[in-house]
Image (tube, rainbow, N blue to C red):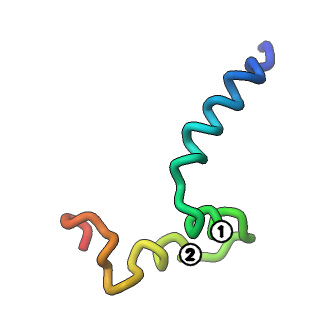
Amino acid sequence: MSAPDEQLVADVEEVFLGWWPDDVMAIVRQPYTPGGLAAYAHRDNGAYLPVEDA
């Protein structure tokens, strides 16, 4: 299997990583913490959860 095109990889990373807020990226860059993203999603009394998940 050939290696993916470097420009394609850079473009995909820019698209996906560029949309994440800085506070989410701070969680992602830290060592794994069980429930870290869940705690982030439920902050401010669940104000950031989609209505069907609240």
Using the rendered view, name the quadrant where residue 32 is placed. bottom right
Dot 2 alpha-carbon crowd within 10 angstroms: few under 14, some 14 to 19, many 20 or more:
few
Q: Residue at x 42, y 72 (%)?
A: 41
Q: Residue at x 56, y 65 (%)?
A: 24
- Type of residue at label 1? Ala
Q: Which of the two discs, 2 and 1, sits closer to the camera?
A: 1
Taking the view exactly as shown, the residue that stands out farthest to the left is 52
Left or right side of 45 for 20 = right
- Residue 33, percent from left and from top: 65, 76
Which SS class for mark 1?
helix
- Residue 6, percent from left and from top: 77, 23
Residue position marked by numbered label 1 in the rendering: 26
Q: Nearer the viewer, residue 2 or 25?
A: 25
Left or right side of 29 for 3 = right
Q: Is residue 21 above or below residue 4?
A: below
- Type of residue at label 2? Gly
Residue position marked by numbered label 2 in the rendering: 36
Taking the view exactly as shown, the residue that stands out farthest to the top is 2
Query: Disc count in the image?
Result: 2
Q: Residue at x 31, y 69 (%)?
A: 49
Q: Is residue 11 above or below residue 34?
A: above
Q: Which tag, 2 or 1, sits closer to the chain's start?
A: 1
Q: Residue at x 53, y 55 (%)?
A: 20
